[in-house]
Image: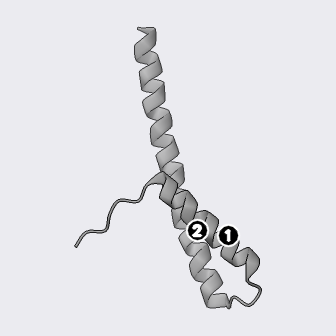
Amino acid sequence: MTKPKLTYTEAVTELEKILSELESNADVNMEIISERVKRAAELMEFCKKQLHELDKELEKMMSELDD
């Protein structure tokens, strides 16, 4: 069974959840913090790629409008 594709909105929501969890729970152990930080880094990289792709698409559309 394949994993459904993550959307930008889902990634941001998960990042916000991780941040909230880390901010509100002083008792989080180091393994959990490490896991959350690694996941957050993955999500941020995903979002960065999504934004870069969107930027390229918008630039292409704008250049086509100028032609």
Image height of 37 relative to 64, above or below: below
Q: Which residue is mark 1?
A: 19
Residue 25: image location, x then y, percent: 73, 83
Q: Position of residue 44 (x, y in %)?
A: 56, 59
Q: List x then y, in percent, for residue 55.
A: 50, 35
Left/right of residue 16 with respect to residue 59 in the rendered view: right
Label 2 element class: helix
- Place of residue 31 in the rendered image (x, y in percent of width and height, measured from the top left): 61, 89
Quadrant in which the N terminus appears: bottom left
Q: Give the label, 1 or 2, closer to the camera.
A: 1
Which image quadrant for residue 40? bottom right
Q: Which residue is mark 2?
A: 40
SS for callout 1: helix
Q: Nearer the viewer, residue 9 or 58?
A: 9
Q: Amino acid at mark 2?
A: Ala
> Hey, which residue is sitting farthest top in the picture?
67
At 43% from the left and 13% from the top, the residue drawn is 65
